[in-house]
Amino acid sequence: MVRFHPTNQTLVGFADGIIAPNESILVSAHCDLCEQCRSKVLTMTEITAELIFEQDKGSKTANIIDNELANMFDAIVSRPSVIPQASVCTTGKSLFIDGKSFKIPPSLQRFSESVGDWSHLVGKLWQAPVSIGGKNLANFIYMERGGSVPEHTHIGNERTLVLNGSFSDGVNEYDTGDYIALNESHTHTPIAALDEGCLVFSIIDEPLHFTSGWARLINPLSHLYFKVSTKN
């Protein structure tokens, strides 16, 4: 069951098309996997379109439109959470790693030709860079069973979507479909579940900054590991 979602403000911005492109990619992919957020965004989009149409006809002022939209949005987000019945994407192109095949959510399929080769980082950690355009760094990250990313914080923002499997980071436990937004105020150590590997898609502004043990030694070189794919 999906437990971690984009904020309501982020969903509104996504529905209105005003959030940053890199954030929009993750929110869209999350909606592929989360019936609850997908339903919210659809409703927000329909309401906005209807109110703008009425405004174009000159029947209402901008202030009335804004007030009605705010009231309708409050009604949407106050509804009881919906438990998705079949929310995980089961069709589309696949990634192959560790002898397994993982389906890519529809919103990420357009990047399937821009995925670089898998490379082994440390321990049970693997990475495949993805070229999404712009300056942001995007990667598929795979942790084998019990594998982990060394303790780190973030110079900028990190947004991660769990595509398959689960992991914990000393703060929360995350499962397939969960959306995680972190910044420089967060420090964590992601560790995959012992009974299965975990695949995530992550977009960061800057390379990770490792904060514990030997991993701190690779900080000067982290830009070489967490970088944009050059694959065309």
Image (cartoon, rainbow, N blue to C red):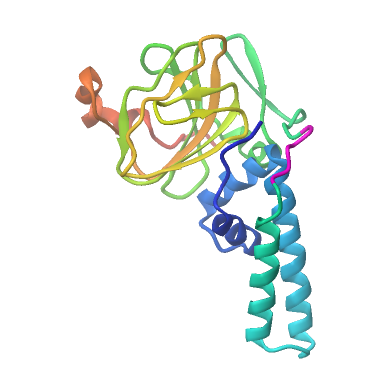
Between residues 229 and 200, which one lies in front from this camera angle? 200
Magenta region: which residues? 81-86
Q: Is residue 82 magenta?
A: yes
Q: Is residue 123 above or below residue 28?
A: above
- What residue appears at the point 50 percent right and 21 percent down from the top-left corner? 142
Q: Give the x, y percent position of residue 193.
A: 51, 15
The answer to whether 131 appears left or right of 205 in the picture is: right
Q: Is residue 51 above or below residue 107?
A: below
Count of labels in the image: 0
The answer to whether 170 appears left or right of 75 in the picture is: left
- What residue appears at the point 61 percent right and 38 percent down from the top-left corner? 111
Q: Give the x, y percent position of residue 61.
A: 68, 89
Q: Quadrant of the N terminus?
A: top right
Q: Is residue 95 above or below residue 25?
A: above
The answer to whether 153 appears left or right of 76 in the picture is: left
Q: Give the x, y percent position of residue 184.
A: 31, 44
- What residue appears at the point 58 percent right and 61 percent down from the top-left corner? 13
Between residues 191 and 209, which one lies in front from this camera angle? 191
Q: Is residue 151 magenta?
A: no
Between residues 73 and 99, which one lies in front from this camera angle? 73
Q: Quadrant of the C terminus?
A: top right
Q: Give the x, y percent position of residue 74.
A: 65, 64
Task: Classify residue 51 by image quadrant.
Answer: bottom right
Task: Classify residue 47 by image quadrant.
Answer: bottom right
Magenta portion: prevailing SS class: loop
Task: Classify residue 119 by image quadrant.
Answer: top left
